[in-house]
Image (cartoon, helix red, strand yellow):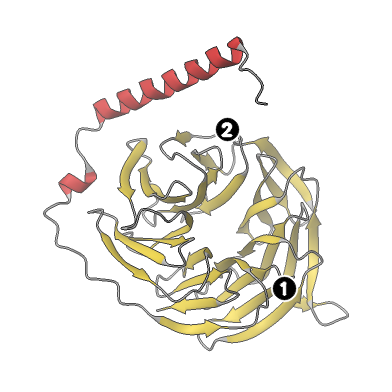
Amino acid sequence: MAPKDDPEVAALKKEITDMIAKFQEEQKKVADCKLFDKCADLGDVPKVRITTKKFLKGHINKVNSVHFAGDSRHCVTGSLDGKLIIWDTWTGNKVQVIPLRSAWVMSVAYADSGNFVACGGMDNMCTVYDLNNRDAQGNAKIVRELMGYEGFLSSCRFLDDTHILTGSGDMKICVWDLQVGKKTSEFDAHAGDVVSISMSPDKNTYVTGSVDRTCKLWDVRENTPKQTFFGHEADVNSVCYHPSGFGFATGSEDKTARLFDFRSDQQIGHYEPPNQSSGFTSCALSLSGRYILCGSDDNNIHIWDTMKGSHNGTLSGHENRITSICMAPNGMALASCSWDQHVRIWV
């Protein structure tokens, strides 16, 4: 039986919803025009014609996360088979297979330099591996095991070779100094699991997405958000910084993808799949920012024209839900991984 809403809680809830509605009204007043109207006379972008150039086989269970290195050639994938695999996406070869102590990996990150990878998940910690050094068994050496989370590790990103940023199921964000293995900051970030982190192109700011349906913009030196973005009606599963640095894209469980703009402090784009029945697990933007791509639980990657809002097509091939997609930093390739145990490189 559901507990009765305490009148005080009900009043507070009403106050919050009224406040949000008021902010939305205020935002509407300053939104003097709509992106899609302004861009209506733009020429249509060509249909994206990319195909699976490399079909990476090697995992023997669901693959949960993929991330490119800064060289746009190597990527790392993490799977429930308890392995991280470093791939050379140009040849399709495995460069290294790293056995994990815990198979429940949910997030992987590749340092821009290509020297380190990190992963974490249901083991409530973030493990960092040095790809240039081997342990006695010949596997990449564990350089840090970062513990002290009260929830699962849902996202991690390197700031540089010596600092890593993590988001976790205990609603916190932590910054770690890898040289000493200590947290340099830890703070409550959201009212729900922090599920996605995306670094800005200049690495000075980052965006987070959460199951509390909001996204926030942070400065790496500060513990309070600079901006908070509302709009999604369900978990924000993925955020992706716009290459211009002026906004970000999101993919959500509410079956929409959206584009938010920092300067106008609000949502400017809203994208829906043609069938309107696919929740989005991950999102990416093309190098120009003109295309937004979202991996979906309908096994496809959906593509839209960011400026006009029109659906541009789908990339199909995966046989189960797509868990993660990642655009190569040079914009030349897209990596996707899925519960079908496969990783695909689209070019």
Nearest to N terminus: mark 1 or mark 2: 1
In the rendered image, the residue lying farthest to the left is 41
**Residue 108 versus residue 238 in the image, above or below:** below
Residue 74 shows up from this direction: yes
Task: Give amino acid for label 2.
Answer: Thr
Q: Categorize mark 1 by other alpha carbons within 10 Å: few (<14), some (14-19), many (20+).
A: many
Label 2's element?
Answer: loop
From mark 1 to mark 2, how far is it between C-alphas? 35 Å
Where does the image place residue 346, in percent across and percent down from the top left? 43, 77
Where does the image place residue 270, in percent across and percent down from the top left? 32, 47
Where does the image place residue 145, in percent across and percent down from the top left? 80, 58
Q: What residue do we see at 40% from left, 70% from top?
A: 331
Left or right of 9? Residue 283 is: left
Left or right of 264? Residue 87 is: right
Query: Which residue is label 1 attached to?
Result: 83
In the rendered image, the residue lying farthest to the front is 1
Where does the image place residue 257, in percent across and percent down from the top left? 39, 51
Q: What residue do we see at 53% from left, 45% from top?
A: 208
- Quarter of the image that includes the N terminus: top right
The mark lying in front, picked from 1 and 2, is 1
Query: Which residue is label 2 attached to?
Result: 224
Q: Categorize mark 2 by other alpha carbons within 10 Å: few (<14), some (14-19), many (20+).
A: some
Left or right of 159? Residue 73 is: left
Front residue (pair 267, 220): 267
**Residue 149 versus residue 328 in the image, above or below:** above
Query: Residue 224's image quarter?
Result: top right
Front residue (pair 180, 134): 134
Query: Residue 185's image quarter?
Result: top right
- Quarter of the image that includes the C terminus: bottom left
Front residue (pair 185, 332): 332
Residue 206 shows up from this direction: no
Label 1's element?
Answer: strand
